[in-house]
Amino acid sequence: MKKVSFVIPCYRSENTLPQVVAEIQEKMKTLPQYEYDIFLVNDCSPDRTIDVIRRLCQENENIRGIDFAKNFGQHSALMAGLRHSDGDYVVCLDDDGQTPADEVDKLLSKLEEGYDAVYAKYDHKQHSAFRNFGSKVNERMTRTMLGKPKELYVSSYFALKRFVVEDMVKYENSYPYVIGLVLRATRNIANVPVNHRERESGVSGYTLGKLLALWLNGFTAFSVKPLRIATAIGGFSAFMGFLYGIYTVIKRFVNPDVPMGFSAIMAALVFFGGMIMLMLGLIGEYVGRVYISLNNSPQYVIREKINL
């Protein structure tokens, strides 16, 4: 009998988490060919989410709890759940009830067909306009920087085979980015259509700052393309500055009475100075991440384990 491990990052979900767990339990009763367990990872939520996790673990021996010492982010919570899971298949989903746990059989069926990873695809997402915009930017970034196939839809509801999980958890650097790790392990990935529900309570934990940090993490952790783009922009700027210098000299010879342009010089200095600072900042970002990784900064710190 194959085993399915569910991994759920939890943040501000004291009101929604019991319903998500109950839905998983009801669905798995209809899939007797699988045994299962559930990993609930509390990302240092400020509400009573950890108390709810403790209660669920007391009531169900196949539910495991992990409590972070501070907030490390969704992707670190996923990595903690993946490391502790032991299922033949691992299913990751949200804690807010918007990802339909009762349609997990669709993802598992695709894995049984031979795919290594399966992502849920939503025809109509019930997120806010802000979250939808963030998803579109993330989609474009993963296509450009990580080489994600254009036809592949990526969401927070996905299933993986064990060998993919085993490869992902080998990554121990400080800035995990789950889709980058999946694409590093395999390209044999499929989509399945599922419904996306409206949020019943609470608000999304993703702020503008967290989304920006996620995008920055994505394209600096698994790609050197930003450095190559910076090199190209720097070369183009230098070439344009060279042309402008030639133009200025020719203009001076043609008409000696033309006054030297202070405004043009200042504009050029500001432009090129800004470009130089931008490129140095980008290089500094890479160097800083290397420095933090060399210092063995952890992906997460676990305060408490329950039923583990």
Image (cartoon, helix red, strand yellow):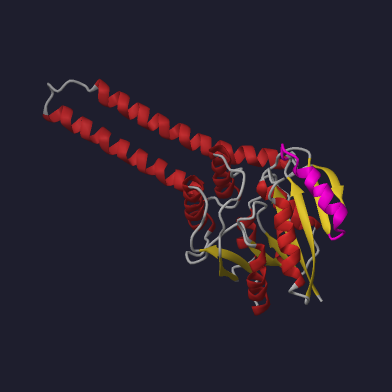
Q: Measured along the vertical axis of the image, is residue 268 above or below residue 69?
A: above
Q: Is residue 176 left or right of residue 232?
A: right
Q: Residue at x 56, y 54 (%)?
A: 198
Front-most of residues 271 and 154: 154
Front-most of residues 72 and 237: 72
Q: Residue at x 17, y 27 (%)?
A: 252
Front-most of residues 249 and 295: 295
- The magenta region covers 45-62
**Which quarter of the rendering shows the N terminus?**
bottom right
Outermost residue toward the bottom?
113
Q: Measured along the vertical axis of the image, is residue 71 above or below residue 7?
A: above
**Total marks drawn?**
0
Front-most of residues 54 and 187: 54
Q: Is residue 246 left or right of residue 40?
A: left
Where's residue 129, x and y in %?
46, 47
Where's residue 40, x and y in %?
76, 52
- The picture quadrant where one finds residue 32 is bottom right
Where's residue 154, x and y in %?
56, 60
**Which quarter of the rendering shows the C terminus?**
bottom right
Q: Main secondary structure of the magenta part?
A: helix
Q: Is residue 214 left or right of residue 19?
A: left
Q: Residue at x 26, y 26 (%)?
A: 264
Regarding residue 115, the answer to whether it shows in the image is: no
- Asked whether 52 falls inside the magenta stretch, the response is yes
- The picture quadrant where one finds residue 8 is bottom right
Q: Measured along the vertical axis of the image, is residue 211 above or below residue 17?
A: above
Where's residue 68, x and y in %?
77, 42
Q: Is residue 158 left or right of residue 241?
A: right
